[in-house]
Amino acid sequence: MQKYSVAVIDFKGNVRESVRRALKLLDWKCSSNESILIKPNMINSKTSEEGVTTDPQIVSALVEVVRDSGCKVYVGDSPGNAHPGKAREVFSLTGMLKAIEDSGAEFLEFEGDPPRLVQTDGVILKSIGLARCIFQHRIINVPKLKTHMQTLMTGAIKNLVFGCIPGSGKGILHRVGVTPKRMAKAMVDVYSVIRPFVSLNVMDAIVCMEGNGPTGGNPLRVNKILASEDALALDMVSFKMAGIDPLKVPYVREASLRGLGPKSFDEIHLLGDPLEEVKFELPSTFVSRVSSLAGYFTPLVTASPHIIPERCTGCGNCSSACPAGAIKLNEIAQIDRSKCIRCYVCHEVCEFDAIGVRKGYYEIIDRWVF
Ligand code: SF4
Ligand code: SF4
């Protein structure tokens, strides 16, 4: 049986030491003259301490290790609602740009070149436009451990899939992923293309997010760093640590069924410190027992977004990011419910917490009936 190693490190205040220890446990190295792309999770300008974006110190520590081996290092990502210039703004506001420049890596803008259209052997998506740079380097994926209103959890695989699709191209996943199962299949279609380019995954679980993640939940200090050469194995261990059966996360189950990593926890070899469970509060959109029954009735019964007028600045971020064209600006944002596909992208990209989410009937049924 093939074993997938995952290193679990108790973070005790020294990021550099923790990262180096994780890589040593995995015996991970890069050879000189390689070109490495570090890909953090940079969804918007909220910081790592707010539980939203990757901790810049983890990226700095990785840059240092890679540079010590004589490799060239780039750091880049495509944030939510990205257009040329947006990524630099997000990197700058979160302190990531300074960390990159101070550690001697080069910032790489995924929106800098037109996407490369690649064929998949997928079930839902037969082709997808991906950032050209991901094919030119070995990737170190540095996700953040968070809950997610649409996919329940987000970690290594989701960070790769959404972040490697530049700009508004991400919208295709929301348009085709109208049910949890379809979203999972579409995500794994894309992941199967990216997977061969990924060399290492390092999970920032120092300050995580619970509740209505990936941007509107509550920060939760867990003080762990986890690492693996396999993104699925890393997600399985991280989600288990968060108190969730990993195979209940639809895209984890789909990737596992397709053989893109471990088939079960038995195939995972844990290294380092003990894996203690830290129970995460789930998103209000996630219904543990009946969500899979929602199917195409999802728009009628699941939680829906609404604008909080006193917080809305009319910046327009939500309307340009909405894949369904369901948001209009009339001084403040307005949502056309008949068009809304409940993808929660608007909630994700709003930096003013001006989009709330009302509970759906299924959650009420789930709480009262079961
Ligand atoms: S809801 Fe948020 S993102 Fe949308 S216009 Fe208002 S402040 Fe901007
Ligand atoms: S209004 Fe928000 S939740 Fe609805 S489709 Fe647009 S981005 Fe998605």
Image (cartoon, rainbow, N blue to C red):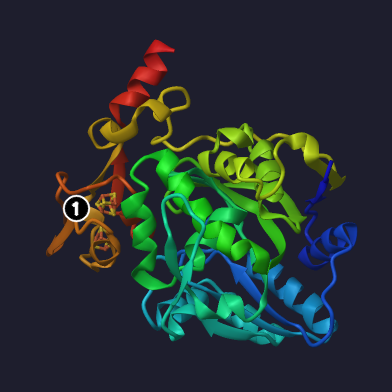
> Which residue does the image show at 17% across and 49% down from the upper left?
339
Q: Where is 114 relative to 292, above or below?
A: below
Q: In which quarter of the image is the C terminus?
A: top left
- Quarter of the rendering containing residue 107: bottom right
Given residues 99 and 172, the one toward you in this image is: 172
Q: Which residue is disc 1 drawn over?
A: 309
Q: In this view, does 328 lie above or below 59?
A: above
* Quadrant into which the N terminus falls: top right
In this view, the residue farthest toward the top is 369
How many numbered marks appear?
1
**Residue 229 showing in the rendered view:** yes
Residue at the image point whose x is 74% and y is 54% from the top: 225
Residue 267: x %, y % from top left: 79, 40
Residue 347 visible (yes or no) = no
Amino acid type, mark 1: Pro
Question: Residue 264: where, in percent of width, then height?
Answer: 71, 36
Q: Identify which residue, 313 or 282, lies in the foreground.
A: 282
Tag 1, which secondary structure? helix
Find out if the beta carbon at label 1 lies less than 8 Å from the nearest ligand 1 atom.
no
Q: In this view, does 80 lie to the left or right of 161?
A: left
Q: Residue at x 58, y 43 (%)?
A: 252
**Where is residue 249 drawn, in percent x and y?**
54, 38
Q: Where is residue 292 in the image (x, y as percent from the top left)?
A: 42, 29
In this rendering, the answer to whether 272 lies above or below 42 is above
Badge 1, how many Cα within 10 Å: few under 14, some, many 20+?
some
Q: In this view, does 255 lie above or below 293?
A: below
Task: Decide if residue 83 is on the left or right side of residue 304.
Answer: right
